[in-house]
Image: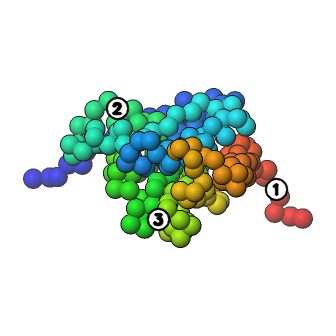
Amino acid sequence: MTATTAAPRPIAARESSPDRLTVVGVSGSTHAPSRTTALVTAIVDTIAARTPATTHVVEVDAVGPALAAARGRDALPPIAEDALTRIETADLLVVASPVYRASYTGLFKHLFDFVDQHALVDTPVLLAATGGSDRHGLMIDHQLRPLFSFFRSLTLPGGIYAADRDFTNYTVSAPELRERIDRTVDGALALVTRGPLEVRSAYF
């Protein structure tokens, strides 16, 4: 008996406008209110303040219950499928997780386990994280960056790490963090919106 291979699931096409970015934030926090969600929202809002953009923030604490009972993507309810489609069709992703046991949360990883492995190829991704102190800042490079390397995404240089002291009542309050957000977003947009590279002759 010959084994058959299921046809790959079609990947939704990006519906981006040449004059407007589709920016999707993903917060890996498992509760609300959340400093991580506040950080993602602040980054996404800063991007939208600098360039025309359509924005949306996916919160895994809201989507998580819809993921729990599904063994495959075809069994996901609409709220989860909508979140995945938004992630897969974004022009720019902003992803963040609270540091949990030296890594991202399990729900954050579970959400991306359902993302098509080919859907994020060449998608720019701005990485961020939150934690109780500065000691956890390297999680961005040691955990998040390898995850999106698997997807062959374009992880943007740098990242934004925020500690508990940078927030007041679950809102970004530290001037230093706001400056880091501004600086990182400016650098990211310079790469994302600069257009095709100039083709130069090999002869000088």
**Alpha carbon distance from label 1 to label 2:** 47 Å
Distance in Å between CA atoms under marks 3 and 2: 27 Å
Label 3's element? helix
Q: Is residue 93 visible?
A: no
**Residue 201 position within the rendered picture, expressed as x and y whole percent measured from the top left:** 83, 58
Q: Nearer the viewer, residue 146 or 119?
A: 146
Expressed as whole percent of the image width and height from the top left, the position of residue 193 reads 71, 42
**Secondary structure beneath label 2:** helix
Classify 184 as above or below 24: below
Reading the image, the residue beneath label 3 is 143
Identify the residue position indicated by label 2 in the image: 79
Q: Residue at x 37, y 48 (%)?
A: 30
**Mark before the other along the chain sequence, 3 or 1:** 3
Q: Quadrant of residue 54?
A: top right
Q: From the viewer's perspective, is residue 84 above or below residue 126?
A: above
CA–CA distance between discs 3 and 1? 37 Å
Amino acid of disc 2 = Ile
Nearest the viewer among 10 and 157 is 157
Outermost left residue: 1
Residue ID for mark 1: 200
- Quadrant into which the C terminus falls: bottom right
Q: Residue at x 24, y 49 (%)?
A: 5
